[in-house]
Image: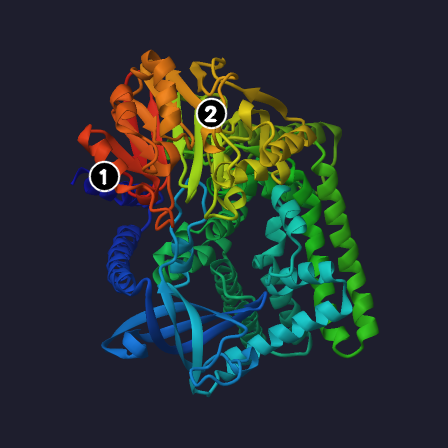
Amino acid sequence: MLALTSWFLIPAFFAAGMILYGYWRGRDTRWVLLPLIFFYLGMVWSCKYERGWERREEIAGSLSKTYVEAKGKITSLEEADGTLKITLKDNQVWKLGYKGKRSADSFSVKGLMVSVKEDSKNEKGGDSTRFKNLLVGQIILVKGEANLFSRARNPGEFDSKSFYQVMDLDMKLYGEDIVIVDSRKDPILEGIRQVKLWIIGIFYRLTGEKEAGIFVAAVIGDKEGIPKEINDLYQKNGIAHLLAISGMHMSVIGLFFYNILRKMGLSYGISGSISSVLVILYGILTGGSPSVERAVIMMVIAFLASYLGRTYDLLSSAALALILLAVKSPLILMQGGVQLSFGAVFAIGGIMPLMVKWVGDERPFVRVISASIAIQMITLPVVLYHFYQLPLYGLFLNFIAIPLMDAVVYSGLAVIFIGSVCPILGTAAAGLGNYILIFYEFACGQISKLPYYNLTFGRPNPQRIVAYIFFLVALFFLLSITTNPKPKKTEEKSNSPSISISLRLILLFSFYGICILLFKPAPVSGLEANFLDVGQGDGILLRTGTSAVLIDGGSSSKKTLGKYTLEPCLKNLGVSVIDYAFVSHGDLDHISGVRFLLEESKDIKITTIMLPYHGKEDEKIKELEVLANKRGTKVKYLAGGEELRVEGLKISCLYPSIEDVPEDVNDQSEVLKMDFGDCHMLFTGDMGEKGEMKLLERSKKELSVINVLKTAHHGSKYSSCAPFLDAVSPRFSIISYGENNTYGHPHKEVMERLEERDVRVFETAKSGAIRLWTDGSNIQFTGFVDEE
């Protein structure tokens, strides 16, 4: 009840502020209640929308991991790497039983994402279903296994469920048999898809493959063909937004046709109507993302304002677009792209004019600088919240890159229209845009060589974001009360004003610098241990103060663990340097992610890697040593009896010592004891029962203080024997394993032994990543998925 009351305080205070604002401005009191009405209508709609999704999730959950047949209408088709992704809407779904017999009851599923391989057969066993036979608007029957979209199970991981919910999709289906029930296509949507394929074909015929991928992304928003290295380069330098369809594209294309129609003598109404239709069709062509929808709505409003002879207000049109998108789906407001899009618009329409007035000069270069700084200030928390990194020099690079992007779009349009008539001239038309793209790549490459070009700050917590908002409010209030009464006119030129203007511009840059410093990661208070959900494997990240320690990091079930789990998690937590990375032994499920960090990751540095002493002859351990040497990482082989300290954390290796002769790879596992105040943790790798008994013989006293045990070998019945658990007597145990793994981990015998000793067990397959925090006396656990 307290949480609910607190939630209602937010709109209440907002409405009160709007009412006071309206009162002070002397407005009609009947109008100042409008924000309050709309805000509470929004809450009612959000609650209704949420209840609707709860019912849809229940249906999807009942169908998950079952073989089904679905009947629905195709609304989109996308082909990539021999797989066709089909979006089906308004579906009827039946469970299929013995010999493919339908269940009596059908389920209504609003949205399905169907993936179909090229060699899929139709249900009659005939020839392969060709992609060209499927058209948007057709009604099809498809059979296959239904599954839910995956949720993020670790900090920083991509959450498929949230992403596809915004697209109004309930679940995914791996299609096998497809039958076209109704072959009638949607002439408009299918026509637009064919135009898109035609445009893509023109670019790939008339330009180089790399340039074609970038042109296609910049002109029609399809990013499938962008080379990975180019995409990463743009992303890390803060200009990846240039490859997303935005208001700039809508302005270029919409105003281009609008001005042509006006010069042809058509009226404002006809010109605006035709241009609006073209802009809407272009929005559909580019995929119709929420940011594109925002730009389309605002462009149509601009044409309407021109027709009515009214002044176009940027903030009002953006607010209307925001309301319309929120009515369509409140979840849209949680997307990073939408927040960045609207944040940039509100910065240009609301903050930039204030900065220009404060500087006292309305010349174009002052407006460009003010707009850039305003956008960076407003979107800074959004960038860090969703991407965890800040391109330090992105502000300056955008000064050059954004104005040139218009030329890239115009060049791309010329390739389409001229190249379709004369291929030679079409190739020539790509020249200007191609040179600009080469310049982008060169500039990004040079900036990437500068120190601190990409800062890893991690995801800011809500308290820091709120504090930042208060700082911005105070800053903008200060600018408003110190603004010159009358801005300097462009014609007025003198040495004195120019010095004042220069100083004010420098101050604006300084204010932005302060904004960046406000998000500098704070040292970790106490000790934080993150037991990551790596599937079938191990991965533990310890943080204390400004230091980070990694213990293992591998998986045999997640082939791309390093790229999609480990690296994003480190960035999310603000970790760019790992002081020590311990590798217990050379099995794949303990080293695959560590290998990725050494071999491919450019944003995460490992200072020292600690390898098992008895693994020196293991080929996989040798490969890690070679990779570490190439990256400039120190290599040390660790044996029992050695210890080190990382700020307030003491790390001791208890087993095996140099004299020991391990029987197998698992017995080579480094056994590490971590001490932080009264919190004592034991990490045992894949140690077996024989190793546990040897450890008891020599380290019984050290083991008696353990209160947190990282259970050995993912809960294998050949580890965690009764004498060992009796000697250690932990209060808490963490088991890292993959759901439905083929090994049967954790084994029933181990779970029973832990239960008999009243040990509280946490399982990564159930709770996702498990976070432990301690101040040295108290211990707190939190599951990433269940948040228990």
* Residue 409 placement, left or right of 711: right
When asked about the image quadrant of residue 496, the answer is: top right
Please name the residue that numbered disc 1 is placed on.
6
Q: Position of residue 739 (x, y in %)?
A: 35, 48
Which amino acid lies under the numbered mark 2 shown in the image of this protein? Glu
Q: How is the image coloured?
A: rainbow
779 vs 463, nearest the viewer:
779
Q: Position of residue 329 (x, y in %)?
A: 36, 60
* Residue 36 placement, left or right of 710: left
Q: CA distance from mark 2 to mark 1?
A: 49 Å
**Which residue is pictured at 63% across the width and 26% down the height?**
633
Please name the residue that numbered disc 2 is placed on.
670
429 vs 387, nearest the viewer:
387
* Residue 376 placement, left or right of 656: right
**Which residue is pictured at 80% across the width and 77% down the height?**
422
Label 1 Cα neighbours within 10 Å, binned few <14 / some 14-19 / many ≥20: few
Give above or below for 682 relative to 446.
above
**Which residue is pictured at 62% across the width and 79% down the height?**
266
